[in-house]
Image (cartoon, grey):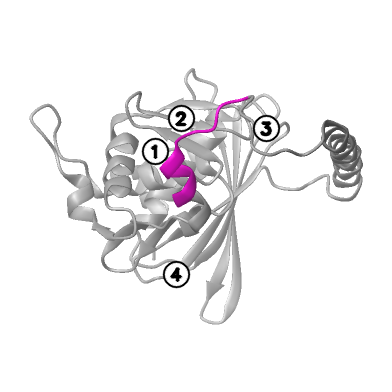
Amino acid sequence: MQLGECWFDDARGELVNRASGDVWHLPRAELQVLRLLCAAAGKVVSKAELRQGDDEHQPLSDSSVARAVFMLRSFIGPGSELLIETVKGQGYMLRLSPQERRSNLHGPRRFGQRVSLVPVWLLSFAMLLAIAGGVYYAWRVAELAPSAPYRVDTLTQADGQMVRLVLYAHSRSNNTLLVEKAAMIGSVLAECRSSRWRDVYLSLSHDSRVLNLTLRGEYLGQAVVRNLKLSDGREPRDFISAEGLREVDICD
């Protein structure tokens, strides 16, 4: 099934990002949530349905469902909040675009498949223009926006408040640890009935031993900021658990 820039291979339990070439073999929670959403595309699926267990697995927790949705949105990328929509007080809904519906009717397009009768010279010229434009764009981004975020994700709390998770990284690859920590923090925030935080910024030090966490929001009409530097020299690095986040009053 076509989902944004990704293709969901239900039989293999994989999500393939066609833009980057990344393949994600989905864990149980993510696979279960995505299968149920795909099966009911265009309809609201309640959290109770998404939590359901079977003969081989125990039911998922609310936090596992929230984390699964967060991780799926993170992998799918831009526009995923509209694709997997949060329906306040009810659950989630997979909302496919007309283009995605057409793609799902014909299955995944294979490399080399002929799609038009455009002359070869015109395709070559267009490709050269695209390459030149890409080089120029990359140069401008590096020059004008060296601190552009690696990724921006959005989650919805129980009261309907939106919270942005902004991830900064030193490179565009090998950011698994950063994404995992963001997913854990996002799942805790998603469980909050409400919180003062509207923007959460995360980054790792060059040696990946320090997690920098900055929370920005509003309280009683005043802007508030909270900075946390969490160091961990162990392997694997944990920095802080979900219980630890609750103990530092990340929720109101």
Residue drawn at (77%, 39%), measured in percent from left and top? 118
Q: Which residue is the extreme one toward the front?
A: 117
Please name the amino acid that badge 4 sits on. Answer: Gln
Callout 1: 10 Å neighbours few (<14), some, many (20+)?
few
Q: Position of residue 193 (x, y in %)?
A: 33, 66
Q: Which residue is the extreme one toward the bottom?
A: 221
Residue position marked by numbered label 2 in the rendering: 238
Please name the amino acid that badge 2 sits on. Answer: Asp
Q: Nearer the viewer, residue 7 or 135?
A: 7
Q: Secondary structure at mark 2?
A: loop
Pick the quarter of the image with the C terminus. Answer: bottom left
Q: Start and end of the magenta stretch? A: 101-111
Q: Is residue 170 depicted above or below 68 in this figure?
A: above
Which mark, residue 161? 4
> What separation in Å lies between label 4 and label 2 (alpha carbons)?
28 Å
Which mark, residue 205? 3
Residue position marked by numbered label 1 in the rendering: 241
Q: Nearer the viewer, residue 53 or 198?
A: 53
Identify the mark nearer the N-term, 4 or 2. Answer: 4
